[in-house]
């Protein structure tokens, strides 16, 4: 009989309490216990990136972290990525650039893309490729994914230029949205 441990954490803004086996990994906990099946499980050994999600603002492999290690943490999964400006913009950009086919890699790709954009990543495609190199995609050939990420960065850069050229625009609350939104 496996011993269980009580944990309490925040998942996509909701407080969750559970009693979990010590060896249950975080992504299985989210999928099997909370029904959040958006985070996918591929290799289960930290190689494919399909299970990537945010723990206290850091993108981690959900298959390499135990649920008990997430006690007290703030978890954001793909189900809530669209609630942030970056996540919403990147999801839209994935659609516009046809950056997904089967969609298996997409939750992890979005996680790494959000991480890249929010860490101040540039439009340099080599840098983008390097940043998402831990996420495998068997369908797209990566080009459309790189384009989707670069497009969000480009949109932000042009908005920053416009804001600089338009005194007072920042104060009017337009700085966090792309032009036209
Ligand atoms: S399932 Fe976690 S990295 Fe592949
Ligand atoms: S879209 Fe199928 S694995 Fe990436």
Image (spheres, grey):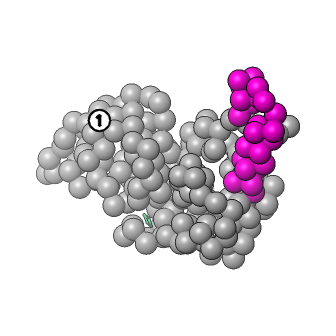
The quarter of the displayed image where residue 166 is located = top right
The quarter of the displayed image where residue 70 is located = top left
The quarter of the displayed image where residue 177 is located = top right
Q: Residues within 10 Å of mark 1 (few under 14, many from 20)?
A: some
Hey, which residue is sitting farthest top in the picture? 172
Give the side of residue 79 with respect to residue 22, left or right. Answer: right
Give the side of residue 86 with respect to residue 167, left or right. Answer: left
Q: Is residue 102 magenta?
A: no
Q: Is residue 161 magenta?
A: yes
The residue at which mark 1 appears reads as 72
| 180 vs 37: above or below | above
The residue lying toward the viewer, choosing from 97 and 11, is 97
Residue at 45% over, 47% down: 54
The residue lying toward the viewer, choosing from 74 and 164, is 164
Q: Magenta stretch: give its range.
A: 151-175
Residue at 41% over, 56% down: 60
Residue 61, image x and y in percent?
41, 59
């Amino acid at each position: 009989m496996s011993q269980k441990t009580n944990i309490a954490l925040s998942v996509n803004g909701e407080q969750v309490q559970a009693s979990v086996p010590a060896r249950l990994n975080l992504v299985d906990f989210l999928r099997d216990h909370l029904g959040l099946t958006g985070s996918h499980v591929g290799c289960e050994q930290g190689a494919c990136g399909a299970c990537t999600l945010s723990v206290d603002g850091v993108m981690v492999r959900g298959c390499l972290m135990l649920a008990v290690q997430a006690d007290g943490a703030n978890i954001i999964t793909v189900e809530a990525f669209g609630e942030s400006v970056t996540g919403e913009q990147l999801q839209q950009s994935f659609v516009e650039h046809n950056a997904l086919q089967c969609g298996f890699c997409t939750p992890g790709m979005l996680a790494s893309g959000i991480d890249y954009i929010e860490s101040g990543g540039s439009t340099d495609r080599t840098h983008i490729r390097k940043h998402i190199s831990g996420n495998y995609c068997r369908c797209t050939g990566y080009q459309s994914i790189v384009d989707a990420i670069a497009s969000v960065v480009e949109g932000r850069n042009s908005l920053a230029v416009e804001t600089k050229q338009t005194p007072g625009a920042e104060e009017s609350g337009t700085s966090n949205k792309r032009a036209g939104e």
